[in-house]
Amino acid sequence: MTDNERLHQVQSHLILARTHRDRIKDGLTVITKGERVWVFDQNGRRYLDLEAGMTRPVHVGYGRKEIAQAAYDQMVKLCYFTPMEFANEPALRLAEVLSEMTPEKINQFFFVSSGSEAVESAMKLAKHFHFFRGERKRYKVISRRGAYHGVTGGALNVLGTVLPMRQVMEPLAPGTVFVESPYCYRCPLHLTYPSCDLACAKDVERVIQFEDPEQISALIGEPIQQGFGAYAPPKDYWKVIREICDRYGILLIIDEVICGFGRTGRWFGIDHFDIQPDLMTMAKGISSGYVPLGAVGCTDRVMDPIDIFHHLHTYSNHPVACAAALKNLEIMKNEHLIDRSWEMGAYFLDGLKTLESHPIVGEVRGTGLWLGMDFTLDKKKKTPFPPQRVIRITDRAKEKGLIIKTMGQALEFAPSLIIQKEEIDEAIRILDECIREEEKD
């Protein structure tokens, strides 16, 4: 047995996240190489990756040697230095670049290693803001049912979906309040937009009053939600939320970990809604997955009262990660990938819309190159489709050389922003086959 064969045995020493042991027993798929929007397994089989690495970070595609070179050059110049009391050039430059592309007043940044760490840091900054202003009772954070904000301690507290990830770790620290999400396809309030008058947004004020406004620090939300499958709220939803937060002195944290850096056809998802956040979290597309990197950005108003940020990660403001991110963002600008995301997203959405003729396809939606296909057992009643059957569609797709993923009763699509029309056409053809086969079963 060769070393390579031994490495790929089922009895691997590697722990896989969110992977049932029964699926591991069926045999590991080891991804060994990536090129553009394609990945290859240990047997040399090629897959069209419609999820940009499954967790959606690879915005510029696989195999970008210029990013690897930027990381190498920085490693040999300065591989690391502490984020306490000292700065480094790549972190300073990246903060300057981000200040020019984020919403106008977001102009101060702290770099971490992941989206979860970014969420933790944002909630800590919000607490620091109130603490140093003398409002030390403000500790509660409002999140939404269906939200995904990561799985570290504080981030897990505001996790409103993928429930076992939270439930196994309960009881959690107190201080999280959940409100309903704007999921109009299956409204949790059993109302219909626009006659509902944005009841899900306006009800946030009632919850705030019940919880005591003087105890609430922040409200956190994704501009477009992952939990229901790339679901965008009505246009005025975030304006209502912004007004409510302002009324009660609550900071608004917008989580751009998935939406940011062109995924939705704008630099940031909140750019579609014309509001000003107080804090923003970022990760994934900031480095296109070439190195671990996340960030939190905030306004001067948030930072001005804070004498010292009592927080530390060893790898915060990491010079190599920041250097790689700078090159990644340079590529995105030079190749106009934000505009391309919007154009290819519209093309992809049109193709997916043709599949709404299937009896089990309830709704197709998308913003830029982040799209969802909701399944149902009854189109009129919108009866939820069994999640295990949606998973069967992803298994069928993998057998045909297409990598896709589920989110609740939906399939979610988030390819690299460099995807071509012919690759989208191939994906639509395979999806059509998989859906037909599931209907027959």
Image (cartoon, rainbow, N blue to C red):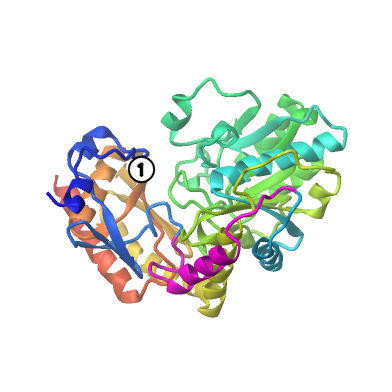
Tell me residue 85's x, y (percent): 76, 50
Q: Is residue 183 above or below residue 419?
A: above
Q: Is residue 366 above or below residue 228?
A: below
Q: Look at label 1 and name its amino acid.
A: Gln
Please state if 127 lies on the left or on the right of 366 as rendered: right
Tell me residue 251's x, y (percent): 74, 43
Please state if 353 lies on the left or on the right of 85 as rendered: left
Tell me residue 132's x, y (percent): 85, 37
Q: Which residue is mark 1?
A: 409
Please state if 363 lies on the left or on the right of 202 as rendered: left
Magenta stretch encompasses residue 92: no
Q: Is residue 128 above or below residue 169?
A: below
The residue depicted at 62 percent of the width and 57 percent of the height is 270
Q: Is residue 439 above or below residue 79?
A: above
Check disc 1 and report its element: helix, strand or loop: loop
Disc 1 residue crowd, few under 14, some 14–19, many 20+, Cα 10 Å: many
